[in-house]
Image (tube, rainbow, N blue to C red):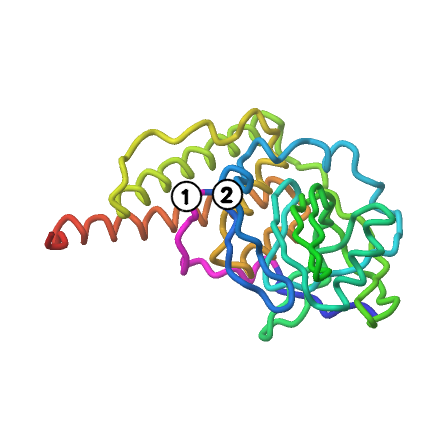
Amino acid sequence: MALPSSLAPNSLNPNPSFLFHSSLYPSTAAVPSISRRRRKPSSLRSSASSFSEKHHTNSPKSDDVVELPLFPLPLVLFPGAILPLQIFEFRYRMMMHTLLQTDLRFGVIYSDTFTGTSDVGCVGEVVKHERLVDDRFFLICKGQERFRVTNLVRTKPYLVAEVNWLEDRPSGDGEGDLESLASEVESHMKDVIRLSNRLNGKPEKEAQDLRRNLFPTPFSFFVGSTFEGAPREQQALLELEDTTARLKREREIMRNTLNYLSAASAVKDVFPSSS
């Protein structure tokens, strides 16, 4: 049977309960059985340049059904995003041995104790791996296609499911409107980075070119990947099959975050911390 569905897109919290990650680095918080590996920042940076068109232009047909091994994790992987992992639980080491002999692809799917396991996830492709003498694995993975679980094939020693591929539907808005929306979201991102730097005592320098010539769809995935403090909101963004809807929601999140940061900045100006 299929995995239980996760949050619907309209369940997003309109009030930001997180701070935008202006550093654009993947989190290094530990997760059960599979943990993020700490590496030098230069090898982990998940910038817009990682979000190529590969997953968008060369993705499988949406009506294809394939079997895919799954990693349920308390995080959301987006197409184009970089995910460092350390694998040490026996069943997942077994999975890695199989993957290293096949196509190096598995499904990352969001799971937590409150909402259960989502039925929409993203393929992670192993681009670098290191096997240690104790049979642990260090991995660097990159997000590829999105998928929806249609049927569980087996649950032991690890999950394997039949999946369909997801693609964004053509938007009713014109190409120019979509480009304008993406540029607006980028502008808000720069403002958030500037205010975040100010609150953290860093120089308020102008942010770099965040889009890096990305088309709106991969750019919307890049934006969603930066909301690391709110995985349920990230999951809802991942599940959307409309680039315009995703960018509009991200614009709303950015605006709410800007309001929060502006208020915090005003409080800091009135009540500066004593040195």
Closer to the camera in the image, 130 or 63 = 130
Residue drawn at (82%, 71%), measured in percent from left and top? 157
Q: In the rendered view of the protein, which quadrant contains the N terminus? A: bottom right
How far is the residue under mark 1 from the one under mark 2?
Answer: 18 Å
Q: Position of residue 249 (x, y in %)?
A: 52, 48
Of residue 58 and residue 185, the one placed in the foreground of this image is 58
Amino acid under disc 1: Ser
Q: Earlier in the sequence, mark 1 or mark 2?
A: 1
Q: Is residue 10 magenta?
A: yes
Contact (CB < 8 A) between labels 1 and 2? no
Q: Mark 1 vs mark 2: give the one in front.
A: 2
Horizontally, is 253 left or right of 167 in the view? left
Horizontal and vertical percent position of residue 18: 41, 57
Amino acid identity at mark 2: Lys
Magenta-drawn segment: 9-23
Q: Nearer the viewer, residue 31 or 130?
A: 130
Q: Is residue 87 above or below residue 192?
A: below
- Residue at label 1? 22
Secondary structure of the residue carrying tag 1 is: loop
Tell me the tag on residue 40. 2
Side of 58 where 265 appears, left or right: left
Percent from the top left, x then y, of residue 244?
59, 40
Classify residue 120 by image quadrant: bottom right
